[in-house]
Image: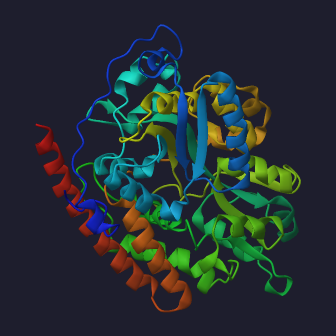
Amino acid sequence: MQDFIGNLSRRTLFKISAIAGAVASVGSSATSAFAARTNKKGTGKMTYWNHFTGAPERAAFAETTEAFKKASPAIEADIQTVTNDDWMAKYIASTTAKSGPDAVMVDVSRFTDMQRIGGLRDITTYNKQWPGAASVAGDTAAFTANRKVYGVPFFTFIDWMYYRKDFFDAAGIKKEPTTLEEFRAAAIACTNPSKGQYGFAMRGGSGGGGFIVNVLHAYNGSLISPSYKATLSLDAAVEAMRFWVNLAVKDKAVVPTVATDGYAQIFSNFYTGKAAMVMHHGGSFIDVGKNLKYGSEVQTAARPKGPKDQLGFQAPLANGVFQHTKNPDAAFEYASFLGSPAAQTIFLKATGYFPTSTDAAKDKFIADNRQFDTAVASLGTLPKTYTFPGLTAWRDLTCLPEFQKCLTGSQTPEGAAKVIVEKLNTVAKAAAVANRKYYEQKR
C-alpha cells in the first residue's frame, strides 16, 4: 500500500490490506427492516466514535442519544469521543487490529484517507433501502467512492466569523470586513494592549492547521488538481503566510497566546472581551448566543475574501459503519438516525450546525434567526473543502508547525511557505501514484 497520508503512522499503513467485503442485500418493508432480517431489528450494543469535545456538541449528542433510545430501544448506544489530535492514529490502529467502534464519524476532509486505509464499510445496500436517503442525497456523493456509499450525511460545516459589534461601534467601524485587508484594518483598530484587548482570536494551537489551508487557498485558489497535481505557487504561499503571520507578529492584533490557543481558548478570549473577532463555523452559533447578545453585542459575518477566493469552506460531515464491526445493522441504524430530519433538527437547535437533510433545513429555526442568513448565503459562495490523500497529515504535521515556528521567531513566513509548498508537492506526487495503483487493483 502506498504512503498516501504522508508522515502519519507510516509503519502502520503498510500493514493494512485492501478490504473487499460487501454488505448483504436485505429488505426494506419498514423503517428499520434492513436491521430486522440480519440483526433482529437492531439489537445489542453499538459503539460510536465522534471527535467532538465541546460542551454544546456533547449536550446535543446526549439529547440525540435519548431520542435514539426511543426510536430503537433494542440498541444500547455507547457514544465515545476521540480527540481530533488522536483521531487518525487511533483509527489506523483500530483498522489494523480489526477491532474498534461499530459506527464512526467521517469528516469529509478525512474521507479519502479513511476509505483507502480500509476502515469504512460499504453501506450502499443499506443506504438504498433506507427511506430517508433522498433527503440527504445532495451530500452523499461527498462520501462515495467507486459508486459505493460509505457515509450518511449528518450536517455541514459552514465557515463564518463572529465580531463584537460593541467593539466595532467603539472603534468607529461602520461595516463588517469583506476583504482580508479590511479584516486586518478592523483587527488593528480594535487592538488596545493596555486594556488587554486585541482584534482577533486566532487559532494557532490545536486545530489551527485548517486556517493555514484557508489562507493559502484564499491567496492561491485551488491547491491541488483532481488528478492530484499540486497547484500551489510559492509566490502565493509566501503572500498568504506573510499576511497570517504578520497579523500576530508585526501588527500585534492577535491575542498573544495564539501559538497554544485551540477551540476553547479562542472562544474564551472572545467572550471575555480579549478579542473583537473570531473565526469558526455555524456549530458555535448557540454557544455564542448564550454568552453574548446577538444584535447589540455580537454579529455573524461571512468570511472575508482574499485575492483569489473566500477565506473558508463548506464541508459536509457524515457517519459511517466501521469495516470490522460485529454489529453492522445497529451501526447503520444509528448512522441513519443521525441523518434523519429529527436528529438533525435536534443538533441544529442545540449547536447551530447546518443540516444536510433538506427537510431539516426547512425548519423555522433557521428562518426565524436572521443571523443564519450568513450561513444560507455562504452556501452559495464558499468553495467545497479539500479531501485528498495526505491532506490531514500535510495540514497538521507541516502547515501548523511551520506557522507556529513563525510565531516564535524560529522560522520566517518565506521559509515556512517554501516548506509547505515542497511538502504539498511530495504529498501530491505520492497521492497520484497511490491513486493509479488503487484503481489498478480495482480492475
- Viewer-proximal residue, 134 or 300? 134
Above or below, 179 against 120 in this view is below
Residue 234 percent across, percent down from the top left: 33, 74
Residue 352 visible, this angle: no
Above or below, 222 relative to 25: below
Q: Residue shown at 54%/79% (left/top)?
A: 245
Specify whether residue 243 is in view. Answer: yes
**Residue 145 x %, y %:** 30, 37
Q: Position of residue 331 (x, y in %)?
A: 49, 33
In the image, residue 54 sits, relative to residue 41, either above or below, namely: below
Which one is nearer the viewer's eye here, 328 or 246?
Answer: 328
Left or right? Give the position of 212 relative to 94. right
Q: Is 306 or 419 nearer to us in this picture?
A: 419
Q: Is residue 267 left or right of residue 417?
A: right
Q: Which image quadrant: the N terminus?
A: bottom left
Residue at horizontal 53 percent and vertical 58 percent from the top: 311
